Image (cartoon, rainbow, N blue to C red):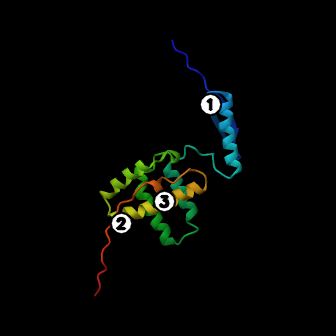
Amino acid sequence: MTTRKRLAEVTLTLPSGDRRHFYGKTKREARAKRDAATVKIAAGYDVGSPRQTVASYLDSWLGTVKRTVKPSTYDNYCANVARATPYIGRHRLDALTADHLDNCYTALLEKLSANSVNQCHRVLHVAFRRAVDKGLLPKAPTSTTTPPSTERREMATL
């Protein structure tokens, strides 16, 4: 019979009233994680939703961006988010990687043109840069992906 070693646990109550648990091999390690989260909260970072999915983040982002852009731009954002959500929406926001996005772009290329996939990449990049600004992500995963290349066509004149 094997015994499992218990991890030390420390709890932090967030300003929203929710509790966040931190674990470590020792109490000191768990307290260090809690203290790091406290510093992030004081700096304005959001540590309240660590398991937020990409789909829920993009929905909330669309809600906040609606009041700052033109209606046609908002419709464009909605369409591009709807294209990408089936492929990356179920992943946790903090666990999203460039590989997930590359797989999404590959799947979208089977249905859409390279220009449309490139436009989807640009919209996702804007959304994930906002997540970085809010402290939800350390780095935008779109910054390390390469969107599909598009061919420049010469303009046809009369």
Under mark 2, the amino acid is: Asn
Establish if 65 lies above or below 137.
below
Residue denoted by label 1: 24
Is 118 positioned to the left or the right of 36 in the image? left
Give the crowd class for mark 2: few <14, some 14-19, many >=20 residues within 10 Å. some
Task: Give the residue at mark 2.
Answer: 115
Is any atom of residue 65 visible in this view?
Answer: yes
Left or right: where does residue 27 sit relative to residue 97?
Answer: right
Residue shown at the point (45%, 46%) measured from the top left: 90
From the viewer's side, name the closer residue of 138 and 115: 138
**Residue 118 in which image quadrant:** bottom left
Q: Mark 3 points at which residue?
A: 125
Extreme-top residue of the structure: 1
Q: Residues within 10 Å of mark 1 (few under 14, many from 20)?
A: some
Identify residue type, mark 1. Gly
Q: Distance between the residues labelled 2 and 1?
A: 47 Å
Mark 1 element type: strand
Q: Where is residue 115 in the image (x, y as percent from the top left)?
A: 36, 66
Crowdedness near tag 3: few (<14), some (14–19) or many (≥20) residues, C-alpha within 10 Å: some
